[in-house]
Image (cartoon, grey):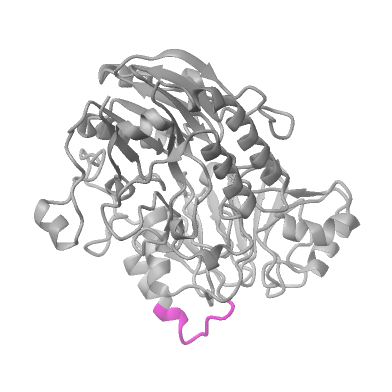
Amino acid sequence: MKLTKKSHACVRLEKDGQTLVLDPGGFSEEDAALGADAILVTHEHPDHFDESRLRAAMENNPTARIWTLRAVADRISSAFPGRVHVVGHGDTFTAAGFDVQVHGELHAVIHPDLPRVTNVGFLVDGGKVFHPGDALTVPNHPVETLLAPVQAPWNKIAEVIDYVREVRPQRVYDIHDALLTDLARPIYDRHLGTLGGAGHTRLTPGASADLSAPGSPGSPPTSGPPGVRRLRRPPGTREPSAPAALPASERARTGMSDPPGRLWGMRIATWNVNSITARLPRLLAWLESSGTDVLCLQEAKVAEEQFPFEQLRELGYEAAVHATGRWNGVAVLSRVGIEDVVKGLPGDPGYDGSVEPRAISATCGPVRVWSVYVPNGREVDHPHYAYKLQWFEALRAAVAGDATGSRPFAVLGDYNVAPTDDDVYDVAAFAGATHVTPAERAALTSLREAGLSDVVPRPLKYEQPFTYWDYRQLCFPKNRGMRIDLVYGNQPFAKAVKDAYVDREERKGKGASDHAPVVVDLDV
């Protein structure tokens, strides 16, 4: 694959006689998109999206197509019927022979008083190249070549360095650099090259790199400055499966209380692991150390036949799984038995012609649980948002009987809704976005009216028990989180609760999910 840098945020990728152009905006050359077989646009800002450049490219090549988010598509799709495709986080597609995954949802924060627009990043050919647009999105996938936005009104060099370390690419090329002066470029080059922990190369506009050639510019370094986690480990050594817990003295110094020991009859948890394959070593270590009896798991992202039944069985867990691969998949893990398994919601509305594996229920010992992964919703005016609300209606209907029953019962999982304004770090940052809308919160109210109550966990650090922190913009270290992983239990379940907490230690370190487990202890 050949990568050619154009001005600012635009790059051209070529392989097998096909050309893919990303973000030919107003700061790039007027002919940046000409000759493209496919064009990807990350968001609507004019330095990434220029309508005249797109029109010229589409008219120049009658078979060319565009993939972008709705805000851009609405402005150009009428001129090119059937050639402009709307995509969002989690989508996959093939464009001019390039396989593309979509990651991310929102533009980075420029200022709290400015509304955030939507933004997506594009992962090309299984991680060969990642273009994040205007956000420091960390894709849940290895990346060979990271296109790093080095200078913008929404970032600083320290954040870019930490971003490179977190993504851990083999090589880094600068993008989003048109505002960087010639005086500043050597400083940025030096800091990124010595502190980022990856091979860093600045291409001038028009320069190219062969991403498949061994020893090409940007090959990963074998050594670097002390303290940079990106550096390769010595031969024969292994990465730890999960980070060690902080010592008690350090936890006391930071004001963090310890996760409690096992005090009561049953421990139940929910965790969006964001790929069980990627998270398996951490998951197994956590199950061994946490004393969890039942775990409701979301975003398995594997087909059922690929689920790690054997590894879990070695720890004493049975598993009920509803998964088909790709982006969804739910499961219930139990070491107290699994009976009466139901996969999917009766009356599931489905999306885009298919029913997704987002819910599974089972009886585990004295308790019945549902593990749910509620649709994200994407944008308020997106069909996925309507699907989300319809899915909530189907969930309410499915749980109504158990919600009023005498047996302890709970619906645990990633609800993709923050119940109150206190459940987000800054509600103003979500103005006009999903997860906080009245309609989504009304769906939670409907579940409570059906007989369920919100089991609110106690935080182990800070004031709010957030459960999710975006990979981007150093959200976890800055505690810019949300409480969207919820436990809704009926009256017998709620009466049996003796403790509930968020195990935020599992959000730390290498290979963490962007969600932390929510743990509930029951006296049953």
315 within the magenta span: no
Residue stretch in magenta = 178-187
How far across and how far down the image is residue 25, in percent?
A: 70, 69
Left or right: residue 69 compared with residue 106: right
Q: Nearer the viewer, residue 280 or 58?
A: 280
Asked whether residue 154 appears in the rendered view, the answer is yes
Quick check: 335 above or below 126? above
Please give the name of the residue rendered at 53% of the width and 76% of the height, measured from the top-left corner.
111
User: Observer-nearest residue: 248 or 328?
Assistant: 248
Residue positioned most to the left: 249
Magenta part mainly helix, strand or loop?
loop
Quadrant of the frame with the C terminus: top left
Task: Farthest residue to the bottom: give it.
Answer: 183
Q: Where is residue 407? Give x, y as percent.
A: 40, 21
The image quarter containing residue 101 is top right
Which residue occupies the extreme top position in the image? 339
Instruction: Locate residue 250 relative to residue 117 in the image: left or right.
Output: left
Q: Is residue 198 at least partly visible in the picture?
A: no
**Taking 31 as reference, is 317 left or right?**
left
- Give yes or no for residue 179 being in the magenta stretch: yes
23 sits to left or right of 317: right
In x, y percent, where is residue 480? 41, 61
Q: Quadrant of residue 519?
A: top left
Q: Nearer the viewer, residue 177 or 504?
A: 504
414 lies above or below 421: above
Residue at figure coordinates x 44%, y 56% from the top left: 423
Q: Quadrant of residue 501?
A: top left
